[in-house]
Amino acid sequence: MAVGPSADRVPPALPRFAARFPAFRPDPCGSPSRFKKGLPVTVPKSLVADFRKALGKDSVFVEEADLLCYAYDSAVLDQRKPAVVLAPSTRELLGRAVAMCYGAGLPITVRGSGTNLSGATVPEPGDSAVILTSKLNGILEINPRDLYAVVEPGVVTARLAEAVAAQGLFYPPDPGSQEVSTLGGNVALNAGGLRGLKYGVTKDYLMGLELFDHEGELVKTGSRTVKCVTGYNLAGLMLASEGTLGVFSTLILKLLPPPKASRAMLAVFERFREAAEAVAEIIAARILPCTLEFMDNKCIRAVESFLKTGLPTDAGAILLIEVDGGSAEGVAADAAEVKAVCLKSGAASVREARDAEEKAKIWEARRNALPSLARLRPTTVLEDATVPRSRVPEMVEAVASLAVKHRLEVGVFGHAGDGNLHPTILCDRRDPEEFARVEAMVDGIFEAALNLQGTLSGEHGIGLAKAKWMERETNRATVVFSKRIRRALDPKNLFNAGKKFVWARRVGPVPVARCPPDQEPGGLGLMPPRTLRARRVQDKYEL
């Protein structure tokens, strides 16, 4: 069944997530005065004229006020203003925009709603382009017989969920920003969500996609079938690529029949350690809740102050749990077992939602954890280091110790059932001394997660914020291998330049000496300048 695109084809003047949650507006210290000095923020008038001729006057933005709207995302980083913002209205025009930008040598950052928390959509400073997908918001097909949907990348996640639910179907991925985030961004960062424990994350629902390469050529991968092993798994390569390998134009997403029954409950614990241990015990009992979320006392009090939903503000921590399944009897049995495990692990009480209204209040509380914390201080730094589920108690204690060590105010919530915690540091970036302690604590969080055999990011991505840690989690060979893939697909390194890895940074063309590929030291192809004749290169980054 074909579903028409939304009538709202106009890109927002400000990112909608920023308008909804004050914490995601530009940081006070990210003012234009902090833009990189000496980098001209302009493109030739002739190129602007070409963009307007190709895309339409209403799809090309070069005014200061427009550019400032896209100089930041939800990460706490310096603003970096692009030279031009493009909003193609069709997929064909998207490909044309990509080809024109790449041909002109403009670094390209593709942006949905800018809700990511890693700086993945902060553009390159100077002569760079932001390409918006907000006009590409059509749900092209919902197929209830074969259980898939075909969408454009600018479709908001919650809008797809609502559209398929109206036809008795289910799209499980539900990131916290689902009311604002786009599906293209979800794929680019492999977004997770509250249901990830049982239903998986975005990668588990991507059946195929179409994308534009650096020449504006359309590349197709995957299919509408349950099985497909035709060619390389390019869709898998594009997952979590953060816009560094190509530009999505169409996504094919798997749908499911919805669960027939569900029950939600709230377990109250006097100490956060007991709540964390209960998570591990529930998983060890071979129960797989749909959702298993954690909130510590700081989060509880912030949410209750904001929403007045009746949360126990004297609790050390709470678990918010939902079980679902194919029968009411089976769900009731699972709920009873979860309740027993919680009580055995030290829960003071376990309250089950009596109706849909109470259930909605439980999940409203969890989804408002971050906005509630963001009201407390000017700057909110949110991380998503992830550990094996059995190590959640150790990770929670490590965060608490780091907060004491660095004298910082921290709230912890997250998807405890899949080991993905969100330590949230409340601070004021205008205070250099305090923010230095924040940065030290963030490094400590990453170090603790890696020491517990975890990972830097469960769902937020790497972007600019975590690039320096990539080699620490993997190794040098992995980073070099990844950069070689990127160089093959993006020879000028213009697709979201500078993201995911630390690059040798320079401004403008400079002499670089290279050796033959078969003599590349460490696989990087770089030699001391005196060794070989230098040549000029045009891209801003070198492998």
Image: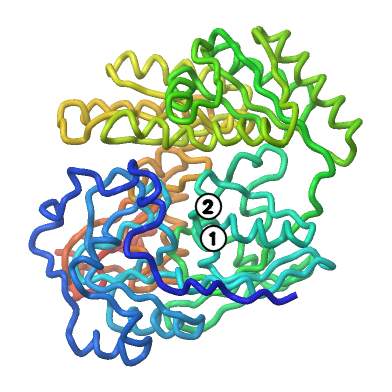
Identify the mark at residue 229; answer none if there is no mark. none
Seen at 71% across and 61% down, the residue is 164
Q: Can residue 530 be seen in this view?
A: yes
Q: Is mark 1 on a helix, strand or loop?
A: loop
Q: Where is residue 301 in the image (x, y as percent from the top left)?
A: 45, 20
The percent position of residue 240, horizontal first and vertical second, equals 51, 55
- Whichever of labels 1 and 2 marks the residue nearer the N terminus, that label is 1
The answer to whether residue 97 is above or below residue 438 is: below
Q: Nearer the viewer, residue 200 or 474?
A: 200
372 sits left or right of 5 in the view: left
Circles 1 and 2, Cβ within 8 Å, touching? The answer is yes
Q: Is residue 528 above or below residue 428?
A: below
Which residue was labeled with disc 2? 179
Q: Where is residue 9 in the image (x, y as percent from the top left)?
A: 46, 74
Quarter placement of the N terminus: bottom right
Q: How many marks?
A: 2
Question: Could you tell me which quadrant the C terminus lies in?
Answer: bottom left
Comparing 359 with 251, the one in front is: 359
Q: Residue placed at 20% from the left, 69% from the top?
A: 532
Against 119, residue 328 (above or below) is above
Report, in whole angstroms, how far the alpha carbon at label 1 lies from the one at label 2. 7 Å
Give neighbour class at mark 1: few <14, some 14-19, many 20+ (Cα, 10 Å).
many
